[in-house]
Image (spheres, grey):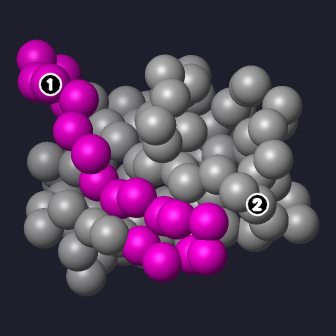
Amino acid sequence: VQLQASGGGSVQVGGSLRLSCVVSGTVFSSTAMGWYRQAPGKQREALAAINEGGAVNYDSSVKGRFTASRDNNKNTVYLQMDSLKPEDTAVYYCKVMGTNYWGQGTLVTVSS
């Protein structure tokens, strides 16, 4: 199983970014996916979990600002991030839920 995350970058406060994670080596349509992040000096935290049907559970820290979605035709899960804050600065990871398969991480930097 391989996960390739992309879409990170530098953005100003209030800006938006969309992360993508392409998954291969598994039956993606039957796979629940998760988005996580790890800020400097902090533990990795869960942001959103999206099930096979597209239903999403969000952590309270991002609910209302971040939107997770998936396209089973493209084996891809997305994280749309709006109203970004400096505290959103972190490396963002995608993960196959229930496994130890992680993407390589993509850096998001939010500056004021």
Relative to residue 31, is residue 99 drawn left or right?
left
Q: Position of residue 89 (x, y in %)?
A: 26, 41
Q: Mark 1: few, some, or many residues within 10 Å (few <14, many ≥20)? A: few
57, 69: nearer the viewer: 57
**In the rendered view of the protein, which quadrant contains the C terminus?**
bottom left
Q: Are marks 2 and 1 in contact (CB under 8 Å)?
A: no
> Residue 53, position in %: x, y?
61, 76
For the residue labelled by badge 2, is the local secondary structure a helix, a strand or a loop? Answer: helix
Look at mark 2 in the image and give the residue it sits on.
29
Q: Amino acid at mark 2?
A: Ser
Element type at mark 1: loop
Say which of 71 and 25 sits in front: 25
**Quick one: which residue is furthest to the right in this view?**
73
Horizontal side of residue 38 vs 86, given as left or right: right
Secondary structure predominantly adopted by residues drawn in magenta: loop
The reply to whether the magenta stretch includes residue 41 is: yes
- Above or below residue 40? Residue 54 is below
Residue, disc 1: 43
Q: Could you say where residue 24 lies in the image, as x and y percent from the top left?
A: 82, 36
Q: Give whichever of discs 2 and 1 has the lower sequence position.
A: 2
Q: Residue at x 48, y 64 (%)?
A: 50
Q: Which residues are magenta?
A: 39-56
Is 24 one of the magenta-colored residues?
no
Q: Residue furthest bottom?
A: 64
Which of 80/11 is in front?
A: 80
Q: Residue at x 55, y 54 (%)?
A: 32
Badge 1 amino acid = Gln
C-alpha separation, residue under disc 2 versus residue under disc 1: 29 Å
Along the viewing direction, whichever of 41 and 103 lies nearer the viewer:
103
